[in-house]
């Protein structure tokens, strides 16, 4: 099977890091469980200037490398790779975050998993023609059997994959979101995702 995996808040604890960063930079104390919106500017009630500073700081290489792994992520992903499944990490991180992001995966025993940067949220100001970058058009031309996402803003992207089961990683900012259709299943962690995958793949 061909598997799409988002990066932030699926295989690493990005939002947890950003809550600490907001506290350090602006003395804004929003606990992780109260991050109600995928848009962190809205969740932390930041000015445009503060939001730009937060995002720059969060993508410093040393900070990207410091994100904690989501429990169970590398274990389950390697299990799938060992079983012969084709796994890709598809991230909406900025293109210039590729190198530390690749290093993070390597450092967490995910060297066998390719990483691609896609401008999922319209943040890039110029196109990059690199082996690791994709346009949305490129992404939509691909096929996947199983996908893992946490961002309601990215649901529209995985809807382009026909007959794709989508595990929605349960996070505070998607709890109130209506799931697009019956192919989207909410999962509380990697154990539940692996169970869903096993059930789905055995029925194909």
Image (cartoon, helix red, strand yellow):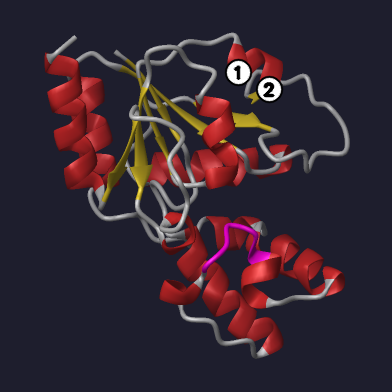
- 139 or 185, nearer to the observer: 185
Please report the bounds of the magenta region as a residue range.
36-40
Relative vertical location of residue 63 with respect to residue 100 in this rendering, above or below: below
Relative vertical location of residue 90 with respect to residue 71 in this rendering, above or below: above
Spatial CA span between label 1 and label 2: 5 Å
Q: Does residue 109 appear left or right of residue 17 in this picture?
A: left
Q: Position of residue 186 (x, y in %)?
A: 31, 44
Relative vertical location of residue 171 with respect to residue 191 in this rendering, above or below: below
Q: State the residue at coordinates (77%, 38%).
A: 122
Q: Position of residue 1 (x, y in %)?
A: 29, 13
Q: Position of residue 62 (x, y in %)?
A: 59, 61
Checking the image for residue 72, the label placed there is: none
- Count of labels in the image: 2
Taken as a whole, is the magenta stretch helix, strand or loop? Answer: loop
Residue sitting at the far bottom? 27
Q: Does residue 117 appear left or right of residue 147 in this picture?
A: right
For mark 2, does the 10 Å Cα neighbourhood hold few (<14), some (14 to 19), or many (20 or more) residues? some
| Discs 1, 2 touching: Cβ within 8 Å | yes
Q: State the residue at coordinates (48%, 16%).
A: 161
Q: Which residue is mark 1?
A: 139
For mark 1, does the 10 Å Cα neighbourhood hold few (<14), some (14 to 19), or many (20 or more) residues? some
* Membership of 71 in magenta stretch: no
Checking the image for residue 136, the label placed there is: 2
- The quarter of the picture where residue 40 lies is bottom right
- 63 or 189, nearer to the observer: 189
* SS for dot 2: helix
Q: Does residue 188 appear left or right of residue 154 in this picture?
A: left
Relative vertical location of residue 99 with respect to residue 39 in this rendering, above or below: above
Q: State the residue at coordinates (44%, 53%).
A: 9
């Amino acid at each position: 099977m061909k598997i799409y995996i988002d990066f932030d808040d699926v295989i690493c604890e990005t939002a947890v890091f950003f809550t600490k960063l907001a506290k350090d930079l602006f003395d804004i104390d929003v606990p992780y469980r109260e991050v109600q919106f995928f848009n962190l500017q809205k969740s932390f009630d930041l000015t445009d200037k503060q939001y730009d500073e937060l995002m720059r700081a969060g993508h410093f290489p040393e900070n990207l490398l410091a994100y904690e792994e989501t429990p169970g992520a590398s274990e389950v992903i390697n299990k799938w790779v060992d079983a012969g499944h084709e796994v890709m990490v598809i991230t909406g991180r900025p293109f210039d975050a590729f190198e530390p992001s690749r290093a993070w995966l390597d450092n967490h025993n995910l060297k066998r998993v390719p990483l691609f940067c896609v401008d999922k949220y319209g943040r890039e100001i110029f196109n990059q023609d690199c082996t690791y970058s994709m346009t949305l058009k490129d992404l939509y031309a691909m096929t996947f059997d199983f996908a893992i996402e946490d961002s309601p803003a990215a649901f529209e992207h995985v809807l382009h994959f026909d007959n794709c089961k989508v595990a929605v990683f349960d996070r505070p900012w998607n709890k109130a979101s209506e799931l697009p259709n019956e192919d989207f299943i909410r999962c509380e962690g990697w154990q539940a995702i692996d169970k869903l995958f096993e059930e789905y793949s055995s029925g194909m």
